[in-house]
Image (cartoon, rainbow, N blue to C red):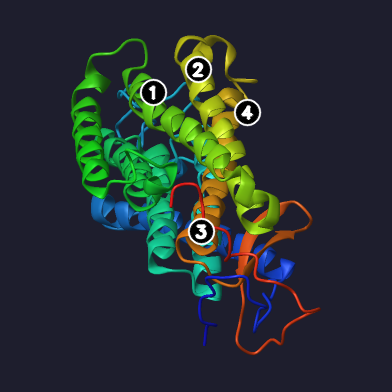
Amino acid sequence: AMAPAHKGHHAWVTAPEPTSECSFLLTTVGIIVVYSSIIAAVHLFWLQSETGGAAVPGGNVTEDFWGNGGEPFDAPEPNYLFVPFIAEFWSVLTVFPMAGVHLLRLAFHYGYDWKVKVMAGWTTWMYSLALFSHMTLYTVVNQVTCGSVISNAIYALCIWGGIAGKPLSWAPLRLVVAASCWGICVWGLYHLPFVLQPVGGVYTLFVVQTPPVVCAFFGAMMVYWRHSEQCKSDSVLFWGLAVLVVSGFMLTCAMGLSLVEVYYGASHGVLWPETCGIPWMHLTIHVLEQLGIYGYGVGVTSVEHGLQNPTPCSMEFAFGVVPYVALGTADRPLLNGAKSKSGGAKSKSE
């Protein structure tokens, strides 16, 4: 059972229990095994439906297995260079849903609020879609993937945007802004991949995703400033908002690099194109996004349990560098007479 929330300067009745670093490693291995198995199963199902299970000479059906080469979202990475049914091998490797599944595991391990669990589950969903987007290059799957990413950001605006203060503290306004932004993004995803040049799909990702990312970055800095006094005495909020700001910076850098990739990815963004075909620009974008989205999840968790719904908690760091919010558990006694880090001084927005 989870401990009750504390809304004032009271001693903890419980202490947060750090999750083991081994759990992080086992979860990572589990993600790789499960999603690799799913990819293999999709391939086998396709072969069964297309060839009746008959062996295919050379292990391939055509040079363009899924038949989507040259489609709007076909990035500069050479296709089918290592595995006959994975169009963009390196991109697939770097969009395994590491950020989402780790956040989801922590959410259920500690019993985070349902709003955080929805965010973690949605993050896992959008990365799962991204994996199959890079694997198959189907335009509609890429469009839905990008729409899912934007929906995640809009969800965060609706749920936690009020902490930025007026006018966003008024919930109806947040809903109107969210609906308007979502409608514009859906329109852009439907039309722009076939209009923008060069590499219309990749260009669309930059055009559609950059505005919400940049707004979220500046929003995170605004929230950090608004609650700077509270952060001085609240380590959970301090580290959570700091992680949120750094994550916003990482995601903004990823967006900037994606624009560079649009124009120079084909000529300068791939190492050893004939042998390894490593799309270093695209992989850098993916790494920045994975780190940034994981940090976004940790940040909003600290906002939920350290500000909006004060709960006994602490900010822990696995391996000394991986942040996560640990909630108190009822079976652990109070340690060293610690004071609640999540309740107390009112924020500037109250």
Q: Which residue is mark 1?
A: 202
| Type of amino acid under label 1 | Val
Residue 118 falls in image quadrant: bottom left
Q: Disc 3 or 2, which lies upstream in sequence?
A: 2
Image side of residue 13 versus residue 197, left or right: right
Q: Disc 3 or 4, which lies upstream in sequence?
A: 4
- Residue depicted at x 41% and y 56%: 119
Q: Disc 4 or 1, which lies upstream in sequence?
A: 1
| Type of amino acid under label 4 | Cys
Q: Which residue is mark 4?
A: 276
Where residue 16 sits in the image (x, y, percent)? 67, 75
Q: Which residue is mark 3?
A: 307
Q: Which residue is mark 2?
A: 261
Which dot, 3 or 2, sits closer to the camera? 3
With respect to residue 12, does 1 lie above or below? below
Disc 4 residue crowd, few under 14, some 14–19, many 20+, Cα 10 Å: some
Where residue 232 sits in the image (x, y, percent)? 69, 50
